[in-house]
Image: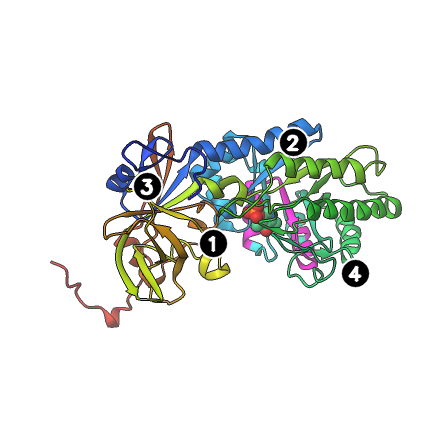
């Protein structure tokens, strides 16, 4: 398994992250356990901030909190000077509870409810990324009712769709639930409408072209398309965009064959494209915002499991089951995502067999990894799955009424619990039994 950040194998042959031996973390917190390498998270934040600072452009780096939204992570984003994207009242609440400065919060989403808009206006967040005409009217009406003015970006689809390893198609993007299409004129119409709304201040536009992207071409193409649009808006409406938000989607290395670029390479490609394509539109270059999620937290996360049962089907496959699965990491089931793993308490032993890692849920699709080489795993061994920091905890569920794991941050030999493991009580906390069905609990 590729070792990320501060991960290393110590003299005892145990995986160590942030100076913490995972066998000790298991003893203290139990498994499954999400372990976050705090130093690596902060390093990724700084890579973005430093690369943009070097570009000379105005910028904001907004952490897309949907990747991993917990209060301690919001604190890190704040301490590192990042802004924050939220997509729901729950993510907004998390950020506000963590004391994240409201003026650096941006609200996304294709169906913000009136209640969510009211909540965000109460908090005085910095910006709404308006997705569609319904929202444009709703936001104007609510803001007018309050006598306030709100900053907006318009989400546009530039006709560039990029995925890791895939060619980007210049078409097809029109068929998206998100945003105003540039190609069919909706985006232009939205700019006209938004700029005429008394209670909206149009800062500019937003585009997000995909996720887990390994090349710069898609971003450069998006900058070119957005610049062409900005030029038309300037020429025909005399409106200049102060802000251009280019979204997230920067790729990370999950497994050996993945070849993402350095953060500085993505940022240089974007900022150079902005300098090239936006030159001469309006008086000055726009401020550039980006929204990395996965690439801030993904490779900093490791999930620690305890091995339980195994089942060998001669000539077919050996299954090794762990005490978690699709409830803490639904990505293999959802996207056929690939992960690497090692036997964390016997990490120096030579690999001796190829096995597949199964979860404990009642679903045949509840598999974490197919065909991973490990030393012969026995009941009680620890299995570490790398690169689980993004879209794991945030997508975790209570399927089979499995309790969601704890999350610890580790750094300099210290571990801090940032999310408690759910209790059995948490599992039934919201359940109600109508009086006509009540029965004395059979405990005691
Ligand atoms: C999901 C999302 C992001 C973050 O994407 P990553 O692939 O995690 O970097 C950023 N912006 C928007 C609008 C998104 O939907």
Q: Quadrant of the C terminus?
A: bottom left
Q: Nearer the viewer, mark 4 or mark 3?
A: 3
- Reading the image, the residue beneath label 4 is 184
**Ligand 1 near label 1 (Cβ, under 8 Å)?**
no
Residue at image mark 2: 52
Q: Earlier in the sequence, mark 2 or mark 4?
A: 2
Whether residue 206 is visible? no
Depth check, mark 2 against mark 3: the one in front is 3
Relative to 380, residue 416 above or below: above
Mark 2 vs mark 4, foreground winner is 2
Image spot of residue 365 (x, y percent): 41, 65
Residue 159 in the image: x percent, y percent?
73, 56
- What segment is highlighted magenta in the picture? 115-140
Of 419 and 169, the residue lying toward us: 169
| Residue 444 appears left or right of 248 | left
The residue drawn where x is 38% and y is 32% is 18
Residue linked to disc 3: 347
Looking at this view, is 304 or 408 the one in front? 304
Q: Earlier in the sequence, mark 2 or mark 3?
A: 2
Where disc 4 sits, the SS reads: loop
Q: Which residue is mark 1?
A: 338
Name the residue located 68 percent from the left edge and 64 percent from the top edge: 175
Q: Of marks 4 and 3, which one's residue comes earlier in the chain?
A: 4
Mainly helix, strand or loop, the magenta region? helix
Earlier in the chain: of badge 4 and badge 1, it is 4
Q: Is mark 3 within 8 Å of ligand 1?
A: no
Q: Given contact means CB atoms under 8 Å apart, are the residues at marks 4 and 1 in contact?
A: no
**Label 4 C-beta lies within 8 Å of the nearest ligand 1 atom:** no
Question: Percent x, y for residue 377?
Answer: 28, 51
Q: CA distance from mark 4 to mark 3?
A: 56 Å
Disc 2 crowd rating (10 Å Cα; few below 14, some 14-19, many 20+) is many
Can you tell which quarter of the image residue 19 is in? top left
């Amino acid at each position: 398994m590729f070792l990320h950040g501060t991960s290393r194998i110590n003299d005892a042959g145990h995986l160590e992250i942030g100076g913490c031996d995972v066998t000790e973390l298991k003893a203290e917190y139990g498994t499954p356990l999400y372990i976050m390498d705090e130093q690596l998270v902060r390093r990724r934040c700084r890579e973005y901030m430093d690369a943009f600072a070097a570009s000379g452009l105005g910028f904001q780096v907004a952490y897309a909190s949907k990747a991993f939204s917990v209060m301690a992570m919001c604190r890190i984003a704040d301490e590192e000077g990042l802004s924050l994207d939220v997509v729901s009242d729950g993510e907004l609440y998390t950020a506000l509870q963590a004391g994240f400065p409201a003026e650096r919060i941006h609200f996304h989403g294709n169906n913000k409810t009136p209640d969510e808009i009211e909540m965000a206006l109460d908090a005085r967040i910095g910006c709404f990324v308006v997705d569609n005409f319904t929202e444009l009217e709703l936001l104007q009406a609510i803001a007018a009712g309050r006598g306030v003015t709100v900053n907006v970006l318009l989400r546009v689809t530039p006709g560039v769709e990029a995925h890791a390893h895939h060619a980007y198609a210049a078409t097809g993007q029109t068929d998206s639930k998100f945003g105003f299409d540039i190609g069919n004129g909706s985006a232009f119409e939205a700019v006209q409408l938004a700029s005429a709304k008394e209670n909206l201040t149009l800062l500019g536009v937003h585009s997000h072209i995909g996720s887990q992207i390994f090349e710069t071409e898609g971003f450069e193409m998006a900058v070119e398309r957005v610049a062409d649009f900005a030029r038309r808006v300037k020429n025909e409406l005399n409106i200049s965009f102060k802000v251009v938000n280019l979204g997230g989607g920067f790729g990370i290395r999950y497994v050996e064959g993945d070849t993402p670029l350095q953060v500085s390479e993505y940022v240089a490609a974007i900022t150079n494209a902005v300098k090239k394509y936006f030159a001469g539109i309006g008086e000055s270059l726009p401020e550039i915002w980006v929204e990395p999620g996965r690439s801030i937290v993904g490779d900093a996360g490791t999930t620690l499991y305890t091995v339980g049962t195994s089942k060998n089907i001669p000539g077919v496959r050996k299954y090794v089951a762990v005490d978690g699965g699709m409830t803490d990491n639904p990505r293999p089931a959802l996207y056929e995502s690939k992960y690497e793993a090692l036997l964390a308490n016997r990490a120096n032993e030579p690999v001796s067999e190829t096995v597949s890692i199964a979860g404990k849920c009642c679903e045949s699709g509840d598999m974490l990894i197919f065909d991973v080489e490990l030393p012969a795993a026995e009941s009680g061994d620890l299995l570490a799955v790398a690169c689980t920091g993004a879209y794991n905890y945030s997508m975790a569920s209570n399927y089979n009424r499995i309790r969601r794991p704890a999350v610890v941050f580790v750094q300099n030999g210290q571990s801090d619990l940032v999310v408690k493991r759910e209790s059995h009580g948490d599992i039934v906390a919201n359940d109600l039994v109508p009086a006509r069905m009540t029965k004395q609990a059979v405990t005691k």
